[in-house]
Amino acid sequence: MVVATPQNMAACNSLLVAAGLTLSSDTLTQLCENAERVIAVDGGLKQLRSIDCNPQYLIGDLDSCNQDDLTWATENGAQIFQIDNQENTDLTKAISFCENEGWLDLHIVGIEGGRIDHFLGGAAAMHSASKSLKIGASFSTCELVRLANLETQVFPFYGTFSVFCFGNSIISLTGSNWELENEMIDFTTRGISNQATGWVELTLHEGDPIFILFNHQ
């Protein structure tokens, strides 16, 4: 059993910053300071330069990076890995890179805003990532946690949260207004807008990864 606090879920060993809508400058700066390493995912380099946070790594096909940003990254010691494989998104490449390096605790920002296909691609990248990875993400209105292994996690939380699955899973859920016991969830709206009553306990018994979104308000 793992106890996780939604307010502190951004503590990680690898922060991946993509090119979409990010958080406030203060919040993004704090995330960078809390991470052991910061990885710019292609155009996310611009986001990091705007707060003067030097990434240790830059990963992607680099089609969204201008020369000034690339020069800034190089001058500040970033290791650049240009991966041109168009069968995978830059986020998928960065996630795979982390797994290969043995960095298994990932937190992702910058996958909301802009084109809806980019957002869905970000969700698909998190869904399909290796189950050995611990993955979380921060959005402007919520925090996300992925459960991929057969485990139980407990979250001290009051407020609105939702549970989604992009495949089929059997879960149990307590500590909320609407609870489940060894029930199947799939890609429907069944798990949306539940109310936590203090301690949310969620168990993944079998099946595909599930996502829990804790709303900020």
Image: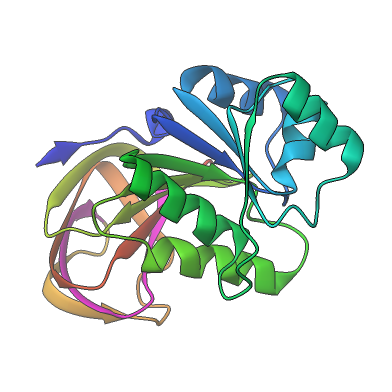
Residue that appears at 52% across and 45% down = 108
Residue 4: x %, y % from top left: 26, 35
Quadrant of the rendering where the C terminus is positioned: top right
**Looking at this view, is 164 or 102 the one in front?**
102
Closer to the camera, 48 or 110?
48
Q: Does the magenta stretch include residue 163?
A: yes
Instruction: Identify the image quadrant of residue 69.
Output: top right
Give the residue drawn at x 65%, y 63%: 84
User: Does the magenta segment cover residue 217?
Assistant: no
Tally of marks: 0
Quadrant including the N terminus: top left
Q: In this view, does 207 lie above or below 7?
A: below
Image coords of residue 31 (percent x, y): 55, 26
Look at the image and tell me whether residue 215 can be seen: no
Q: Residue 155's x, y, as percent?
A: 26, 40
**x 76%, y 68%: residue:** 115
- Residue 70 or residue 162, whichever sits in front: 70
Lateral position of residue 74 relative to residue 95, left or right? right
The image quarter containing residue 54 is top right
Q: Residue at x 57, y 24 (%)?
A: 32
Relative to residue 24, is residue 151 drawn left or right? left
Q: Where is residue 16 in the image (x, y as percent from the top left)?
A: 54, 41
Decide: is 115 above or below 201.
below
Magenta span covers which residues? 160-176
Mainly helix, strand or loop, the magenta region? strand
Give left or right: position of 200 versus 189: left
